[in-house]
Image (cartoon, rainbow, N blue to C red):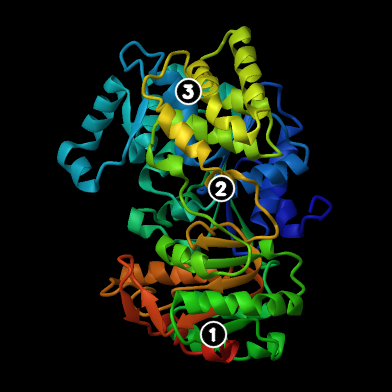
Amino acid sequence: MTSLKPTDEQSKIISASGNVVVLACPGSGKTFTISRMIAKESEALLSFQGVIAISYTRKASAELEDRCRELGVVGGRSFFGTIDSFSYVELILPFVCRNPKWGSDVKIVPSLSARDIEKRGLDIIVDESLRSGTFPLNLLCDVAVRILRDVPAARRYVAARYTTLYVDEYQDCGATQHELVLALARCGLRVVVVGDSRQSIFRFADKHPCYLEALLNDSSFSEYVLTANYRSHPSIIAYSRILEQHAENLRRAAAGASEYFGQDFRVFSVSVQGDESAIASHISGKLPLIMDKYDVGSRGEVAILARSNHVLERLSRTLAVPHRLYIDRYLSKFESEWSRILDQLLELYFSKSRFVYDFVDTYCLYASARHVRSRCAQLVSEFLQTSIERLPEAGGLVREIIALCRQETDDNFDLTVYEDLVSDQESLVSSYSPVDQNQVNLLTYHNAKGLEFDVVFCLETYKYIMPPYNSTKAEEEESLAIHYVGVTRARKACYLMVGTRRHNAKGERHRAEPSMFLEFDGLSKLRANVTW
């Protein structure tokens, strides 16, 4: 990977100065390009400086960080993570607890509903949160914006510590996230954003490509494009280009497309008698042949995508090949500071590519004294050397690590939760172990954003699912974007799985019909229809 040479388009972006907007089609090498921008910039950084690299999923963030490590970007001075985690770790934790006007403790609580926010008022809720130290999960960015506005020390810290803000998937940016990006820019940070309005799939959560368009219209930003899809087979590219078009352009776009790749179809509409279990059985049986046909080196280059977790869980129970199900971890439901620290500690325990001081630099924020940081590093090292069988006995050690990270005893730390979590070793390993290249990946379409695989199986391409029943025009557009994202994750082959039965979230079984997205004019000429 590191030996690849950038294309002309990529080289122009890597060498660009000032604020940058990159419009990147699927498979155009945006992660490749961003990692090389970061690596080039890191060569000139001072010892205490780093960059902020924001992705919208933990998996995508880890991939970018690993790419940067391959290029020699090491250490904990740069921040890789989500925009919420940046808000929490770099702004809320250090500047709320140290401000005498605000709460001395910090606690994350479940998200507030839109109705509650509208009823009470956003500004009032943020004020209350700052005074109490209790922060709703969906308002972390709002709080971060307020801190940057009201705390000069926070602005000075950001300006001294970081030089550039990189943000991926900007078409899925919301109003507050956009405001935070602008606030960081006003601190003096250079801003580089990457996006593609055609992949906007979070409009239900008020995430909209209009903010990407706003930066395109901002004279302080230079626009660059990545136009070539290097990921996917020409058949998949042709199929996805049809999906990009407006309805009036579909026929014109399809004309002559088959000449581009002959009859080597790589998009398949697969009809299966039965529900998710039948689909899982057929995938299990056909997968070795498919991998051999397309020269797929490992099952880790195969993904099965669905819109909902319950479908993936049902599929997982029947799938007879090694696989990994990516769903929310057990600790995510606690939404507290101690659970976040513990989650990262366990991730460090199972990871082979992370370093102790990366953890200390990120979480031991209060420890200006060198001996405190050294003690934290010592304890973390001791925890990492604990055998997995003895992890249930290490609760006291974990409690001390969390206390050092916060410089106080956390009475809210639930030791029984920790003991229950590490005692179920099968679930623990499944959740935290590094990716096994022998395992097929089971993900939602939303979690697959930014990732790529040799072979992709797209599930739930059904009427009433894509798009949902009685959907608005906006919901139809978003569902089409989700479908587009699924197809364009594939490098070599894409299988659109259509069963005759489906289950809803309640477990009720219904008759399944193909999605309207499979019936667009011109698409049938660009795929092979098969029955398993």
Q: Circle 3: is it few (<14), some (14-19), or many (20+) Cα within 10 Å? A: some
Q: How far from the left and from the top, in percent, is residue 30?
A: 65, 55
Which amino acid is tagged 1?
Val
Near-viewer residue (312 or 139): 312
Which amino acid is tagged 3?
Arg
Q: How far from the left and from the top, in percent, is residue 286?
A: 64, 80
- Identify the secondary structure beneath mark 3: helix
**Which of the two marks, 2 or 3, is nearer to us in this view?**
2
Which quadrant holds residue 103?
A: top left
| 96 on left or right of 86 | left
Q: Identify residue for label 3.
A: 155
In whole angstroms, how far apart are the C-alphas of marks 2 and 3? 45 Å
Q: Which mark is residue 426?
A: 2
Q: Identify residue for label 1.
A: 270
In whole angstroms, how far apart are the C-alphas of marks 1 and 2? 34 Å
Q: How far from the left and from the top, in percent, is residue 497?
A: 51, 79
Which amino acid is tagged 2?
Glu
Furthest toward the right, the residue is 3
Q: Earlier in the sequence, mark 1 or mark 2?
A: 1
| 115 on left or right of 341 | left
Q: How far from the left and from the top, in percent, is residue 197?
A: 48, 62
- Identify the secondary structure beneath mark 1: strand
Please tell me how many numbered marks the rendered image carries: 3
- Identify the secondary structure beneath mark 2: helix
